[in-house]
Image: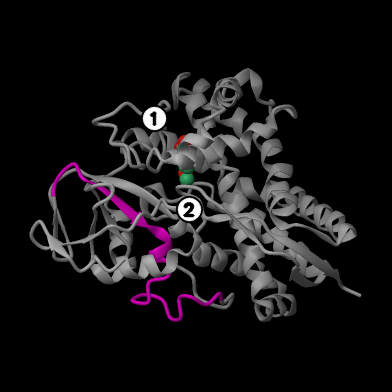
């Protein structure tokens, strides 16, 4: 730290902060503050990319897809210069007009109306899980709740067969690491990639998906001519990739917040209608998806910093969500806060297409807890899970105190 004020290459602040290091993951907040304070855009000398960490500029980038494209990848690798490690996503790693065709399908499959049909089933699954966990009393809030819940509802909603669901978490861990540099974290997560990728190749296909579910609905769009038979499996892949680890870390974040800030838990118990707001604030506060890159399609100026065409810019969603230029007391978890506008789900044309599903899952889990639990206690040291993109815990030992 301390180098951020050093100016090289004209008007650009420079920093040697490594946002993909364990020191950063252990406590990102001083680093994020340094990046926000250094300037509207900061040159990251370790990776030769730009960093944007202020809310105003992250938000502007997310809305300006023409200037800040996704088609050259949303990770560190520039697809114009190197071959993607997996076939490019036609949703996440695409620009209009291709992006729009895939997006239209998923907008429909994951629409608010579609979520209504899932509501009762999802709420019942949350109730059942919390009942089981209350009987145990003490358990791991990550494995036994934050992971167990999405795994109990999402694969069924997608229409996956029962076997091989254990591949979902390692696959997600791999992809989200792969948005970062080829560091030790990445190499470790792809060590055993072959069986995972073999499973994935099959699981994307039509004949591997139940006749009812998100997967079947995506493939049905081939019959109507909306998408090609080559595109459908890739759109299913987007759900397999983005549908589990994200919600795991969202629910984990909410649980960790409510366990750490008991006055917020008491407030939620007193007014359970705040369950959705409590989840949303956890997404702002922890920002489970910390960063994504864009690539400039032309020379641009961000604030007073000049940036060339073809440059990678790392958007710090988590830093933007705690920027004191935009948020009052950003480092406080406050379930009554107006969270609208946070960029935890992104913004603009790529804004999380599964956000309604994520919120449904988060809400029913927190609502089930408020109905049955009086106290959430952390009983042992939480352990962080390191990932180049995702922020969350590996372990959260907790004890639930039942009501009565
Ligand atoms: C995709 C994809 C993968 C990872 C994340 C994501 C957060 C999408 O393959 O389309 O969105």
Neighbor class of circle 2 (other Cα within 10 Å; few <14, some 14-19, many 20+) is: many
Q: Name the residue under label 1.
A: 88
Q: SS of the residue at dot 1?
A: loop
Residue ID at (37%, 72%): 323
Neighbor class of circle 1 (other Cα within 10 Å; few <14, some 14-19, many 20+) is: some
Image quarter where the C terminus lies is bottom right
Prevailing secondary structure class for the magenta stretch in the rendered image: loop
Earlier sequence position, callout 2 versus callout 1 = 1
Q: Name the residue under label 2.
A: 289
Q: Check the image and report above or below for 15 versus 92.
A: below
Would you identify the image quadrant in which residue 97 lies?
A: top left
Res 232 visible: yes
Q: Is residue 9 left or right of residue 166?
A: left
Q: As rendered, which of 109 and 36 lies closer to the eye? A: 36
Q: Is residue 96 left or right of residue 310?
A: right
Which region of the structure is painted magenta? 308-333
Residue ID at (55%, 39%): 172
Q: As rendered, which of 140 and 306 lies closer to the eye? A: 140
Q: Do the residues labelled 2 and 1 touch (CB within 8 Å)?
A: no
* Residue 244 location (% of width, % of height): 60, 43
Q: Does the residue labelled 2 lie within 8 Å of ligand 1?
A: yes
Res 213 visible: no
Q: SS of the residue at dot 2?
A: loop
């Amino acid at each position: 730290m301390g180098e951020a004020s050093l100016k090289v290459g004209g008007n650009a602040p420079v920093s040697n902060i490594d946002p993909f290091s364990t020191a950063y993951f252990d406590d990102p907040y001083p680093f994020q503050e340094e990046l926000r304070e250094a300037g509207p855009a900061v040159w990251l000398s370790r990776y030769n990319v730009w960093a944007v960490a202020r809310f105003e500029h992250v938000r502007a980038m997310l809305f300006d897809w023409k200037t800040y494209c996704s088609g050259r990848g949303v990770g560190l690798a520039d697809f114009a210069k190197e071959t993607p490690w997996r076939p490019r996503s036609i949703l996440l790693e695409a620009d209009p007009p291709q992006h729009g065709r895939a997006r239209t399908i998923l907008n429909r499959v994951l629409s608010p109306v579609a979520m209504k049909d899932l509501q009762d089933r999802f709420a019942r699954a949350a109730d059942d899980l919390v009942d089981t966990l209350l009987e145990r009393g003490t358990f791991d809030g990550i494995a036994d709740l934050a992971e167990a819940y999405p795994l109990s509802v999402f694969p069924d909603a997608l229409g996956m067969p029962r076997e091989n669901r254990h591949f979902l978490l390692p696959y997600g861990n791999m992809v989200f690491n792969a948005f970062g540099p080829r560091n030790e974290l990445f190499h470790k997560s792809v060590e055993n990639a072959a069986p995972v990728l073999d499973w994935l190749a099959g699981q994307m296909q039509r004949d591997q998906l139940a006749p009812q579910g998100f997967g079947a609905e995506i493939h049905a769009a081939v019959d109507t001519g909306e998408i090609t038979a080559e595109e459908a499996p890739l759109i299913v892949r987007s759900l397999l990739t983005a549908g589990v680890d994200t919600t795991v870390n969202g629910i984990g974040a909410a649980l960790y917040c409510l366990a750490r800030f008991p006055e917020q838990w008491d407030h939620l118990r007193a007014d359970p209608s705040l369950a959705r707001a409590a989840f949303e604030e956890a997404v702002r506060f922890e920002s489970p998806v910390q960063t994504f890159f864009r690539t400039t399609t032309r020379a641009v100026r961000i604030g007073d910093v000049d940036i060339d065409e073809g440059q990678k810019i790392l958007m710090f969603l988590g830093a933007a969500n705690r920027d004191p230029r935009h948020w009052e007391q950003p480092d406080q978890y406050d379930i009554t806060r107006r969270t609208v506008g946070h960029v935890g789900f992104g913004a603009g044309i790529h804004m999380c297409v599964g956000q309604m599903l994520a919120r449904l899952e988060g809400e029913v889990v927190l609502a089930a807890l408020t109905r049955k639990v009086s106290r959430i206690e952390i009983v042992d040291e939480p352990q962080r899970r390191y990932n180049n993109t995702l922020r969350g815990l590996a372990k959260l030992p907790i004890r639930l105190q039942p009501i009565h």
